[in-house]
Image (cartoon, grey):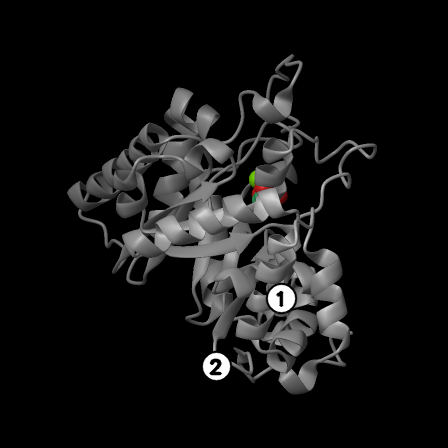
Amino acid sequence: AQQRYSSLRNLPAEAKCGSRISLLMNAGLMADLPSLVNSGADGVGLFRTELQFLVRTRVPRRSELAAIYARVMDAAQGRPVIFRTLDIGSDKVLPYMKPQDEPNPAMGWRAIRVGLDKPGVLRMQLQALIRAAAGRPLSVMFPFIANAAEYTAARKALECALAHETALGRATPTAVEVGAMLETPSLAFAPNSFFEAADFISIGGNDLKQFFFAADRENERVRRRYDTLDVSYLALIEQIIDRCARAGTRLSFCGEDAGRPIDALTLAALGIRILSMRPASIGPVKHLIRRVNLKDLRAVIDAARGDGAQTVRPAVTAWLARQ
Ligand code: PEP
Ligand code: MG
């Protein structure tokens, strides 16, 4: 499949209406990085750092992590890489961590909640990222931010780590941006000040959808029960798009749906301009975006909603077949 789309590799994901969509890839291991060049991705929109912790038998050392992060940035050859801090707990249990006996781990002590309650590992990871990015820009995003206060606290941890490196006389990144993953419906309703304070926001659709519909993403019986193109979910996405636009805050969508061509087109038609997906999806998604007019698609989506559809998928699919 990669081969089939290789002629598109150096072409932009520009729709017939002129809208340009930035296609980024998700990664987590060094082995993913050759895909960055092969897929034609504009950068890494989500680097899942927990994978480096999951493949080990102990907590990695700061120097080890800094070396890995520096190699990731080297391999990106100047393209942006967004590092997501540890998202452990829930489905990702570290072999060397005391298992938490939680009835609902997906809604339990995970991700930034662990990072803020036990700041040692987060601090170490932030220091490793800062050291790896010395002399170049650094993008960090915090997972599973559920309210503005968590974003503020996480950001403060990064600022403290930066101040510490400066006090030690070490070189620091040339610029630092701090983003939040929007993965719980609550964050979509945070005060404006949050949307203004965040340097960027990325919708983690895998988690956001499971919490919006209260349907476990790991439970085969319910995980496909609600459509990503359900009108209620699209209304939530639109609200986030609108709030980010008003605040002038960059918005991206990562999570598996960004790599599903029809879903990706719909997100783009609603106004999402940055999609981050598995590398193999970049070609197919780009191919489709280049074939369509997103303004026309938007009209089709609005008409389906006006007609009282539960999901806009049949309308989008039928329209696409006519293109
Ligand atoms: C998400 O929830 O959409 C996401 C990108 O994070 P993860 O799949 O790692 O939970
Ligand atoms: Mg998630």
Mark 1 residue crowding within 10 angstroms, few (<14) / some (14–19) / many (20+):
some
For image coordinates 32% across by 44% down, the residue present is 195
Work out whether mark 1 precedes mark 2 in sequence or the reverse, and give the earlier one.
2
Q: Which residue is mark 1?
A: 300
Q: Position of residue 226 (x, y in %)?
A: 72, 40
Q: Position of residue 58 (x, y in %)?
A: 59, 31
Q: Position of residue 257 (x, y in %)?
A: 65, 53
User: Which image quarter holds the C terminus?
Assistant: bottom right
Q: Is residue 24 visible?
A: no
Kindly check if marks 1 and 2 are in contact, taking CB atoms under 8 A apart as contact.
Answer: no
Question: Could you say which disc has been placed on residue 99 in the image?
Answer: none
- Hey, what amino acid is under mark 2? Gly
Total number of numbered discs in the rendering: 2
User: Which image quarter holds the N terminus?
Assistant: bottom right
For image coordinates 75% across by 80% down, the residue present is 3
Residue 310 against residue 291 in the figure, above or below: above
Looking at the image, the residue that sits furthest to the front is: 307
Mark 2 residue crowding within 10 angstroms, few (<14) / some (14–19) / many (20+):
few
Q: Which residue is mark 2?
A: 18
- For the residues labelled 1 and 2, the Cα–Cα distance comes to 18 Å
Q: Secondary structure at mark 2?
A: loop
Q: Secondary structure at mark 1?
A: helix
In the drawing, does residue 147 fall left or right of residue 176? right
Q: Quadrant of ligand 2?
A: top right
